[in-house]
Image (tube, grey):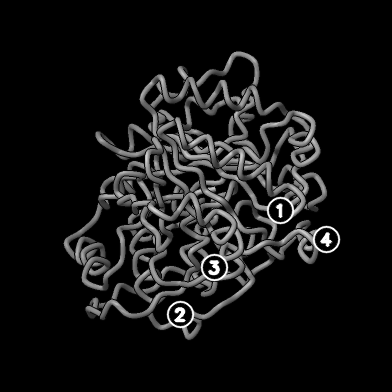
Amino acid sequence: MPTAHHRDLAAALTVAGRNHPYLAFTLNSLCNLDCVFCKPRCMPDYGHKDRPLSASDYAAIAAEAGAWRVKKAHCSGGEPTLRVDILDVIAGLADGLGQDAAIGMTSHGNLRRGLTVERLHRAGLTYLNLSLHSLDPTRSAAIMGGGDPRTTRDTLDAALSLGLRVKVNCVLQRSYLDDAFAVAELARDLPIAVRLIELQNIGPAQALFDTEFISEAEVRDRLRTWFADAGEVPRDQLGVRSPGRYLRPDGWAGSIGFISNSSCATCSDANRIKITPTGLARPCILHNRDIPLKPHLADGTLGDAFAYLFQSMLDRDTNDAWQGFHYVDYDLRWDRMERPEGAPVRPLLPVVATGAEGASCARASTGER
């Protein structure tokens, strides 16, 4: 449990102008689809060489995080719903973070047999991010390597009927731009946030980038009639805390936002602690502050690990890349990137309050993909 000094670390994030951290869990690398910009099965660590965290591990991490006043956890993959214990994982996160916590998931929405949005909601899920890149089944299959957007739409409707917040993630590709606009127009009648995501020049997407990349600025210009009288949506209504703007065109039920990792990625407001499937916590993509959680789970010293993570978030303010542009959003969803060994947990030092300037993770880090 946090000591008084630990609580000072948590409070210092507010003094430094930072959002309180949330936990972003990548539950697996496995996926039964094969999106052209992701292609999970081509990666050398597909399936993982090490044993992923268990449901009880996630529950223990959430319980410690809850003591640090963390109130949000997000699950992604791979496709997280392929885990046979997904309901136990969600329930453990919800129990650990406590009442009023936000528990979310990113999924392609083609749920395996026997798994329903209702069951996920009963386990503790409060919001759902759905990957949807075209409403046309044939064109969607060409992008995602399978699946059916009509099934995803059924999942979306089920989530809304249960009162879950819903966001839709749509990756922008020049060849499928009309498809992206059709997805975005779902927000005309539905109370959802559609996030138009720039293609990134990393991983399998490198083969597409030169021909398929289209910037937020160009898309905004093409949609200028939608945005002419649009009002900005307060991010607290969306459960989003990032520098991105969400706009609601006049008369629309939902909103449209952008995740512009390539054209305008900055480090100004990141608050995500990424935890890979095998339990490596990464509070920053540019500083090497990685720390393995498994030894702390085994030794009962998660409090020391969280003290390290909170201090590492404060240390982002010293990063020279703050507000610099970069094209490296290390694919932290999995354990694929070889990075130097993280330093051991440091001695706890007095916290010196810092100014609001500085940061070191990209806006992409708050994308909740």
Tag 4 near tag 2, CB within 8 Å: no
Q: Nearer the viewer, residue 62 or 367?
A: 367
Q: Quadrant of residue 215?
A: bottom right
- Residue of label 2: 322
Q: What residue type is labelled 4?
A: Ala
- Residue of label 4: 207
Please identify, in this view, whether the residue under mark 2 or under mark 3 is nearer the observer: 2
Please identify, in this view, whether the residue under mark 3 or under mark 4 is nearer the observer: 4
* Residue density around tag 4, few if under 14, some if 14–19, many if 20 or more, within 10 Å: few
- Residue of label 1: 173
Say which label, 4 or 1, has the lower sequence index. 1
Say which label, 1 or 2, has the lower sequence index. 1
* Residue density around tag 2, few if under 14, some if 14–19, many if 20 or more, within 10 Å: some
Distance of mark 1 from mark 2, alpha carbons? 28 Å
Q: Quadrant of residue 212?
A: bottom right
- Residue of label 3: 285
Q: What element carries label 3?
A: loop
Compared with residue 172, is residue 362 higher up or lower down, i.e. above or below? below
| Residue, far top | 114
Q: Which residue is drawn at 77% across and 36% down?
A: 139
